[in-house]
Image (cartoon, rainbow, N blue to C red):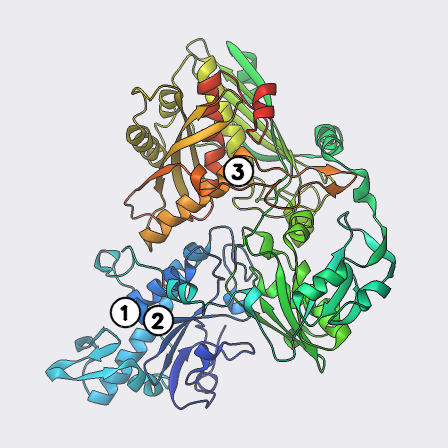
Amino acid sequence: MTTTRRDFLKTSALAGGGLTLGIMLPGFMDEALAAGTIYTPNAWVHIADNNTITLISARSEMGQGVYTALPMLIAEELGVDVHKVKVAIAPPNAVYTNALLGAQITGGSTSVRDGWEKLRIGGAQVRTMLISAAASKWHVDAATLRVENGMVLGPNGKKASFGALAEAASKLPVPKDVQLKDPKDFKIVGKATKRLDTPSKVNGSAVYGIDVKLPGMVYASLEQCPVIGGKVLSFDATKARAMPGVIDVVQIDDGVAVVANSYWRAKKAREQLSVQWDEGPVAKIDNATMMDGIRAAEKNAKIISIKKTGDADKAMQGAAKVLKVEYQSQLLAHATLEPQNFTADFKDGKCLVIGSTQFQQGAQGNVAKALGIKPEDVDVRTTFLGGGFGRRLEVDFIVQAAQISKAVGKPVKLVWTREDDTTHDFYRPMALHRMAGGLDADGKPVALTFQLTSQSVTQRAFGLPKDTLDPFMAEASVVGYGIPNMTQDLVIHDTGLRAGYWRSVSHALNAFANESFIDEMAAAAGKDPYAFRLSLLDQQPRFANVLKQAAQNAGWGTPLPSGHFRGIALMEGYDTYMAQVAEISMHDDNEIKVHRVVVVADLGHMVNPDTVEAQLQSSIAFGMSAALAGQITLEKGRVQQSNFGDYPVVRMNEMPKIDVTLVASTEKPGGIGEPATALIGPALANAVFAATGKRVRKMPLTPENIKMA
């Protein structure tokens, strides 16, 4: 973006002078409008004349800690106490595009990786402009000035607050080239910092989607077809309309909404609806038919190459021992603790939507399309997210709220039940891996082939052309081991059930297959799983380092308590190198008890180690829930699970001790919100093999699947 000096000097005279390296857009939160706004290429920092500093966050806070980590990057360059930086969520705008994902999206463990440089530059630009303003005011050389604790300090005791200098600084050009602090001089970045959003969550002032209230707001509960994709043929709302508090009953694209003066009344009245459905094609599928289609897909679909190294087929022919196996991964729901909900207010051809979303631009564009208005007439405001995990990249529930509001002419809060959420998700797709490996006479691997058949979320969500490599299916498909001949291939097959991005996306699918299979190769070679892996990492120092540390920290090779067993796994994901060792015991009924998980992560530069450790713990809990019990099953297109009773998550008493080691590194930052989720599955599966001698090649690791192995 280029700007003229005239554009740069434009301000909104709301409360006097102020410096914002930002842009004036509809939907800014009040904190971002404290004093003034300036049009400029940099959209991140606001300094009011009362010395209030606000970060305009381009990423949503869904528990991963960006409302602390991103302000730390700004505060480091500005020389201010991070606890004095406020945060306002950005409205939809291309300037807030996540460069790693190509849209204004929170996901893919990218928030810090994307913001690492741009936010530091933003802070440094503001710092430079403030110093220049002070130098001009005091008639001194800017080189003699410095910033500290929200002040510009100069010779002879001169000092001025950022707020006092903001108006003058706003009249200066934005510097293109700025000097960033040397990491060795960091005082904030890299230091464990308590989360800035914790007080608001403790005292109840934090606003989630479920907390939103608007004047005159009513509530909606939506009856959707029990088969995803089904449509309304007809409905009888006579009984529902007679229920207390009911305001209206309206049909929208996805079903029939009951609107009432309270959520409970809307929900109870919804139960009185009689709806006839056209269930559509999904009614013909179940898990068995979906897997049958996946197995048969190779015959008709194009095989897409991910990577080829050497000649695996030839090497396999000359191998002393060849292994060929298959791995299956299950359908999974996101199961966010805050069920989907959104508030919408349509009037006078414009629509305000407020709630929890990971995809502001998607919300804006899809609401505009559904209502027949311009995107700029849709004001998207983002709250805290009570869990995202990829589910809130979807905008179905946002569009539903907007359509209901337009139909009834009132602001509406749409709230899904837990059952709605579980049965109408965008599920992590099924996957089939065909793996083959060749060992020479000494047990050294000479070839490895990998073929994934699964569904492309990117084709559905973003229109990726058919027979095109989906990079979000290829994650963690290429192992870091020094195997001279390898091929990694992909077959894309649409099972007919809508699929969505799920925390760690294809890392979890591919790491389960790769790390279980490398364990199988080690067993076939008669080698220790740790030693076998380490022998293949001569050219991969970061891999080797985390593997060694994890094995050492777990006491690999040393005696365990009676009935305890270990499994190990290794992966690079999101530019983070990680090893895990899981320690388990098995009960007579094939139930797994996880006692300890040792994790070592090298994620390059860390912004907030405290958040990193919390994310590792969170990811392991999330991944354990999926690996041990999570699965979605369909019968005649109907999802059979409905709540945490039959789609369980790990409980507090089931959590293992988690030992975390974070590797000090000067490499570029890696993502940490997802890789541990992907790695815990194979670590547990390998521990089950150590305990039972059974190789479980089908997720989840339920007693039934262990028994059938």
Residue 42 x, y percent position in the rendering: 43, 72
Three-letter code for the amino acid on which mark 2 is drawn: Val
Three-letter code for the amino acid on which mark 1 is drawn: Asp
Rounded to the nearest angstrom, the CA distance separating label 2 from label 1 is 7 Å
Residue receiving disc 3: 508
The answer to whether residue 709 is visible is no
Image quadrant in which the C terminus is located: top right
SS class, disc 3: helix
Three-letter code for the amino acid on which mark 3 is drawn: Ala
Residue receiving disc 2: 85
Residues marked 2 and 3 touching at CB (< 8 Å): no
Q: Residue at x 30, y 42 (%)?
A: 663
Residue 293 position by quadrant: top right
Q: Nearer the viewer, residue 362 or 542?
A: 362
The answer to whether residue 368 is visible is yes
Q: Residue at x 35, y 87 (%)?
A: 167
SS class, disc 2: strand
Q: In the displayed structure, would residue 114 be above or below residue 572?
A: below
Residue 125 position by quadrant: bottom left
Q: In the displayed structure, would residue 389 be above or below residue 262?
A: above
SS class, disc 1: loop
Residue 398 x, y percent position in the rendering: 66, 64
Q: Residue at x 40, y 15 (%)?
A: 527
Rounded to the nearest angstrom, the CA distance separating label 2 from label 3 is 36 Å
Q: Nearer the viewer, residue 26 or 413?
A: 413
Of label 2 and label 3, which has the lower sequence position? Answer: 2
Q: Nearer the viewer, residue 639 or 670?
A: 639
Q: In the displayed structure, would residue 622 be above or below residue 402?
A: above
Disc number placed over residue 81 in the picture, else none: 1
